[in-house]
Image (spheres, rainbow, N blue to C red):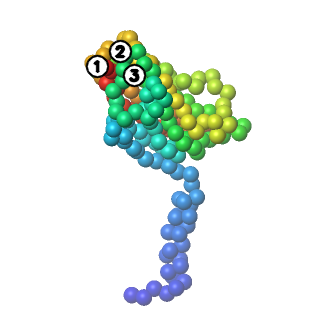
Amino acid sequence: MKISKPALVVLLAPVILSSVMLTSCNFSKGTKRDLLTGLSFSYNGFIVQDVLLIDPANKRMTDNKVQINTRIAIVALGLNNYGLKDGKVFPGMMLLVTDKKGTVILKADDLFAGDQGHPPAEATELRGDITVAKPMVAGQTYHVKARIWDKVKADNEVNIETDLVVQ
């Protein structure tokens, strides 16, 4: 069966239009896992370069072992595609640490609560610090969950999880 050129154009027009519409949208979705630290994250809406565990010396961690009485951080890098309100972005960041029984050790519902917004270029890197201290105990494993969201564009979020082995 041979299709004439005008009929072929009519058949392909919706496919071409759909392709153009999809590539013109700022849509980003995915997951990533660091095989060295076990940190995993998923993102929807945001564009995310990476999420890292940072040690007390402010260097990328190569495993998930942490010393008691130190401070580490979860850092999201290259965050883009925020919604804007009056030219500013309004991120939110939740941080939760629990022991193996699910008991809450540390909980911050929003590290940026009450924030007055930022120019987009100043919110491409977000950091949540975790103090590894009592009631944490050496020899135990703790589960960390973090969530970053956009207070303007509700669908934008990054969900982060990892385990920390306290030594």
Label 3, secondary structure: give it. Answer: strand
Measured as percent of width and height from the top left, residue 11 is found at: 49, 75
Nearest to the observer: residue 144 or residue 102:
144
Label 1, secondary structure: give it. Answer: loop
What type is the residue that disc 3 sits on?
A: Val
Residue 166 found in image quarter: top left
Q: Earlier in the sequence, mark 3 or mark 2?
A: 3
Label 2, secondary structure: give it. Answer: loop
Q: Is residue 22 above or below residue 150?
A: below
List the residue tagged with mark 2.
136
Total marks in image: 3
Q: Residues within 10 Å of mark 1 (few under 14, many from 20)?
A: few
- Determine contact: label 3, label 2, CB under 8 Å: no
Nearest to the observer: residue 61 or residue 2:
61
Q: Residue at x 49, y 20 (%)?
A: 108
Q: Residue at x 64, y 25 (%)?
A: 115
Measured as percent of width and height from the top left, residue 110 is found at: 53, 24
Q: Residues within 10 Å of mark 3 (few under 14, many from 20)?
A: many
Q: Residue at x 58, y 33 (%)?
A: 91
List the residue tagged with mark 1.
140
Mark number, residue 97: 3
Measured as percent of width and height from the top left, residue 58 is found at: 48, 29
Mark number, residue 83: none
Residue 61 found in image quarter: top left
Q: Distance between the Cα atoms at labels 3 and 2?
A: 10 Å
Q: Residues within 10 Å of mark 2 (few under 14, many from 20)?
A: some
- Determine contact: label 2, label 1, CB under 8 Å: yes
Task: Judge left or right: residue 125 versus residue 68.
Answer: right
**Residue at the top extreme of this rendering:** 134
Q: Quadrant of the N terminus?
A: bottom left
